[in-house]
Amino acid sequence: MLGLMQDWPLLLHRIIDHAAIQHGRREVVTRAVEDGAIRRTDYARIRQRALAVAKRLQMAGIAQGDRIATLAWNTDRHLELWYGISGLGAITHTVNPRLFPEQIAWIMDHAGDRLLFLDISFVKLMEGLQDRLPTIERFIILTDAAHMPETSLREAVPYESWLAEADDDFAWAKLDENSAAGLCYTSGTTGGPKGVLYSHRSNVLHALACAAPDFMALSSRDTVLPVVPLFHANSWSLAYSAPMTGAKLVMPGAKLDGPSLLELLESEAVTLSAAVPTVWLGLLQHLETVQARLSSLKRVVIGGSACPRAMTEAFERKYGVTVAHAWGMTEMSPLGSFCSVKPGYAGLEGEALLDLKMKQGHPPFTVEFRITDDAGRDLPWDGTTFGRLKVRGPAVARAYFRREDEAMLDEQGFFDTGDVCTIDGEGYMQITDRSKDVIKSGGEWISSIDLENLAIGHPDVMEAAVIGVPHPKWDERPLLIIVPKAGRTPDKASLLGFFEGKIAKWWMPDDVVLVDAIPHTATGKIQKTTLREQFRDYRLV
Ligand code: AMP
């Protein structure tokens, strides 16, 4: 027997409808990409313009299921495109501009994108690539006629002129909630990037899960600054969960440096912000340099790579900002866990609380975890046994775009994340490593992430990476690679001395090298593959 409730499919445009009706005057503030000026609009106008986007796309012959690419920073225009494209039943393909140009061309060609909406920052880049993108019919520059650059891009037009050709008299498409709505490629290291195809339903469920109190805990009283870009897996749901709850949005445009972020955090009275650790490093350094305080910020979400202990400590103890460590991946829409304090850990203080906050946390309803050994046998949730982390849920991918034939799940429907972790008795997960980055020494595993997090607490260290290098007896041993703070040259004894008493003796790195910079991936993670290549011939003495 079926239930007798209304048929109300979970469609993304219902989010912007709700925001416009219930929170219509709530602001969306943008730092303009063209000149850094502050621009203000609200959810009612975002919805109106999103309707016009959908109508204008239809006039251009765009149909349901077509892929429309964006190469753009977080702005109001990107947000209205985001809702307009999926509201027509087309698919927003957010392209990460930090990928190598070859990868950008590869994924846009693979996706078969029909239009590209791009910020003026990326015009030159695309002029060099357009000949390799025959499926792109038109390049629409996210600006107005006054700021339109000279360009050889095919059929180039300023967005405002393009949009002005349509009014907002449009009815959102009637769709199955399982229809595709968004496409985001993982920055795959082997076999080319892989496309994750989100549905309306998966994104709505993910946004509901993320907004809940043990996770982003969003409300209409919040002001949210998503530093994490729309092109980094749905800006960790904020472009959906903020309008869903009526939180004010502050879009930082192209300026993600410490001074620009501090200015927006203060002038717009931001209460919650989310970004990868490298962004927060920039803000914390700037705060130290100018000796500033954070007067409104209450919470920061830190994820994408492991949050160093020193960062949590600085935010919480020095600036009074609560840190929520989060973990996820593109294939999970992306959030998989959040580190908020369950009653089982209530009352923790000082170092014990910091220890807890180093964990990546517990999953929301809609995400199931298991850890297994290499043979697929379940491992205990005791906080010490490492295993492969596998996940299941309605916002987790079951296949990659245009690779539907390749099996991606185990027999119970779980996806192997490629991360190695422990899970404790309270259900908190802690990442030990990527399975390919873990250092295998004498048959045991050493966590490169734990060593990196400790190293960054040394007063002379700005950034740290640990990789395994070949060793004749132990297979692999850890090599510590350090970027020192400006003007400092810490020696090996001082750096290794810093680990004494904090790690098992056999985890101690065998050597230390100082470098000017550590390479990063397009989503801000340390690029271990490049480092391993760089130190391929390194021999421990
Ligand atoms: P991406 O799909 O590019 O976002 O990459 C996902 C991967 O980033 C995960 O599988 C983890 O290896 C890593 N990652 C994300 N968040 C964290 C975190 N909080 N701590 C450690 N690793 C993380």
Image (cartoon, rainbow, N blue to C red):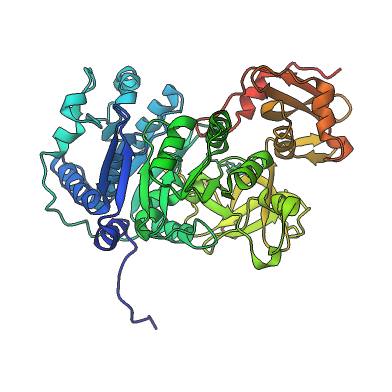
Q: Nearer the viewer, residue 6 or 72?
A: 72
Q: What percent of the width, then of the height, locates residue 168?
A: 14, 50
Q: Quadrant of the C terminus?
A: top right
Q: Is residue 374 left or right of residue 506?
A: left
Q: Is residue 342 left or right of residue 232?
A: right
Q: Is residue 289 left or right of residue 425?
A: left
All told, the count of numbered labels is: 0
Q: Is residue 117 above or below residue 413?
A: above
Could you tell me if residue 373 is visible in this image? no
Residue at the outermost bottom position = 1
Q: Is residue 453 left or right of residue 288?
A: right
Kindly identify the residue that appears in the image at 43 percent across and 61 percent down.
208
Q: Is residue 151 above or below residue 207?
A: above
Could you tell me if residue 27 is visible in this image? yes
Q: Quadrant of the rendered structure where residue 537 is?
A: top right
Q: Nearer the viewer, residue 60 or 30?
A: 30
Q: Is residue 141 above or below residue 296?
A: above
Q: Quadrant of the rendered structure where residue 372 is?
A: bottom right
Q: What percent of the width, then of the height, locates residue 505?
A: 89, 37
Q: Quadrant of the N terminus?
A: bottom left
Q: What percent of the width, then of the height, locates residue 361?
A: 63, 55
Q: What percent of the width, then of the height, locates residue 139?
A: 24, 28
Which image quarter has ligand 1?
A: top right
Kindly identify the residue that appears in the image at 63 percent across and 40 percent down.
311
Kindly identify the residue that appears in the image at 33 percent across and 78 percent down.
5
